[in-house]
Amino acid sequence: MVQNGSHDAKGEGLDKGLTLNLVLCGLGAGMLSMPWTQAGTGIINMMVWAFLVLLVTYFTIMLVVRAGEKAQCWTFEELIEKAAPGSARAKKAWSLSATAAIWSTYFLCLVGYMIIIGDSVVPTLDHFGFFDSVSLTPAEVRKAVLFVGQACIFPLCFLNQRQLEYTSALGTFSNCFIVFAVLLNFLEHGKENSNDASCVVATVTSGGNLTCIANLMMAITFQPCVLPMYQEMNTDITNTSRPLRTPRNFARALLTALAILYGLFVSFSVAGFLSFGAETQSNVLNNMPTNEWYTSVGRVCMVGVCLGVYPLMLYPMVAPLEESQQPIGKVVLNISSLVVAFFVKNLGVVNVINGALGIFFLVGLYPAVMALGVLNQSTRQNGNGELERGLLAHANGDSTASCWYSTPMMACLVVLSFFGMVLGLSHTQNDAGNLSRNCIMSI
């Protein structure tokens, strides 16, 4: 940890590589389902939900980063174990439960990326007449595509966060092209059915609102990813080419990334919804006209996004394992996601279930435990038996814990996230058929 000069002007600024990694963490499977979820809610509704979800994401991610800095822990499970109340056995149980939550939710993310690869490549091959030259059924071609995709992903899973900045840059560019492709399709073809009105504002009681929130949460629930990213920030005060590792510099990168994500989410979701309306599929690329050049390029670009984001999601899953066990863990997870993707094809349901689970465990419960066990304490004892000030107190020049991490605030976070999970799991469909009855204003 950098003690002297951590707030020096030369050590502050925007870490562009970190920003790209954070942006890519929010792209991929969840984004492709956003037009589908918006088909069950209004345009303004989605814009409001996206803003609120991103706001909560910023709050909880910075909570995790500040707690990690104060406790000097760089994995989600280790930080939970230190922050959790009770005996050593109870703390270990908390850590194991966090591991189970991360593996279950992030494994669904890995499966989602494999589904996207199949959905993107198979129609493209069909468009170019590949099926006519081979004696394979579409299902067999899909399995072959998934196998090749996994073979391309596998070596990337052994790169560190800094090395993954290059794939993140490629993935971010690819996702921007996909947004461009959907916008271009809308400008060239307009609505598929000009007689359908597009809902601008719907009632908050519409079931599509819950699906929209759950999918948004799935897209940007990457709290367990941030501690390894934060740990690998620059700690050398003499290296002025990159900002130093401080929560303030991480916050700059995070705010920039979330602002970019908000623009991409809204433009992509609105353009897809206006183009396809109630017929929008859970992977909007499946709605795109196969004979257009930008559809083929967009699908190929989506494969690039998956190649970039897959290793970032795998990273926190194997981080708690011993270094010698991590390669085995990566092999098991990659094979498992491949096998499951052979049989699971509905991206939207996978995203909504994943998002609902992530709301409670990764956005609500575990960050609250970290806040109460680490950030709500004004001092801590270091390895030499000396008391040190907490991170927030050190930054603000006082020794009082922030009211934002108080027991009432964290209790509200846990309760709200629990109800969000229950409601999200009870609404796994987009409810597009009922939007017209719940619509307040349409165009």
Image (cartoon, rainbow, N blue to C red):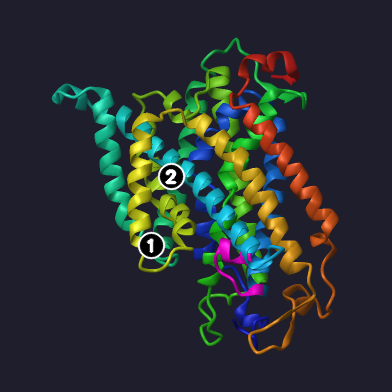
Determine crowd level at label 2: few under 14, some 14-19, many 20+ residues with C-alpha closer than 10 A.
many
Residue at image coords 50%, 24%: 281
Give the tally of numbered discs.
2
- Asked if residue 117 lies left or right of residue 274, the reply is left
Sequence-wise, the earlier of marks 1 and 2 is: 2
Pointer 1 with pointer 2, Cβ within 8 A: no
The picture places residue 292, in percent across and down from the top left corner, at 36, 27
Residue 46 part of the magenta-drawn span: no
Q: Nearer the viewer, residue 194 or 153?
A: 153
Disc marking residue 326: 1
Assess disc 1: are there few (<14), some (14-19) or many (≥20) residues with their C-alpha within 10 Å of its C-alpha: some
The spot of residue 62 in percent (x, y) is 68, 62
Q: Which residue is mark 2?
A: 110
Q: Quarter of the image holding residue 163?
A: bottom left
Query: Residue 388, how many percent across, how many down?
Result: 73, 83
- 142 versus 252 height, above or below: above
